[in-house]
Image (cartoon, rainbow, N blue to C red):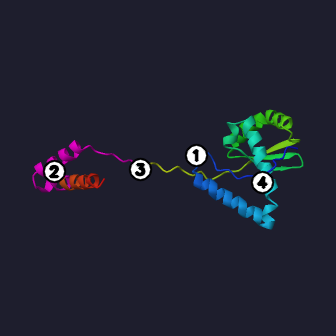
Amino acid sequence: MKRPSSFLFKSPVGRSSGSAQATRGVADFLRNHDKMAALLPAAARLAALQKDCAATLPALFDLCSVMQFDAGQLTLSAPNAAMAAKAKQQLPKLQESLLQRGWQVNAIKIKVQVRKLTEKPRPEKRLALPPQAISALAELRNSLEDSAQNKQLKSALEALLQRHRRR
């Protein structure tokens, strides 16, 4: 059976080196803690299995993951029933590939594990007006008559000008 010689926590793609240093600190803490250190080989084994599964079926393992591998029984998680059905179609290919890579996989089960989806925060729109536009808006504000009808428009223009002058 394929086993990694050592287990290193790696930062996910796109993360800063600061988080990589933090994960190394976590790994060091776990290695120094007696009860947690016993879990590291199992975690390394699952991480290596996840990597081999992703190498075989990269599109599928963007959303699916290895949950458990015990006594030749591999259990995978899928985020929904549709993904589980797609994964089920690929199980013979996955099992054959894992056997070629040295994993003794006798059976594969798929469990649907619904995860809470986190919505990516939308970037705040920042419009930078050129100086000519700011001066034109200021001229417009100054040229408007002081009337009840123009009061809200003038205050909106003033707020806009204040916001863009602070930048």
- For disc 4, the marked residue is 43
Residue type, label 1: Gly
In the current view of this chain or complex, which residue is farthest to the bottom? 34
Give how far across and how far down residue 46 sits, in percent: 78, 49
Q: Is residue 129 left or right of residue 83?
A: left
Q: Which span of residues is magenta-colored?
A: 124-153
Q: Earlier in the sequence, mark 4 or mark 3?
A: 4
| Left or right position of 144 against 44 | left
Please tell me whether mark 4 sits on a helix, a strand or a loop: helix
How many other residues sit within 10 Å of disc 2, few (<14), some (14-19) or many (≥20)?
some
- Residue ID at (14%, 47%): 139
Above or below, 18 against 64 in this view is below
Q: Is residue 125 shown in magenta?
A: yes
**Circle 3 is placed at which residue position?**
124
Q: Nearer the viewer, residue 139 or 20?
A: 20
| Structural distance between the alpha carbons of marks 4 and 1 | 22 Å
Per the model, the C-alpha gap separating discs 4 and 3 is: 39 Å
Question: Whole-Å distance between the Cαs marked 2 and 1?
Answer: 46 Å
Residue 75: image location, x then y, percent: 80, 47
Q: From the image, tell me which residue sits under label 1.
A: 14
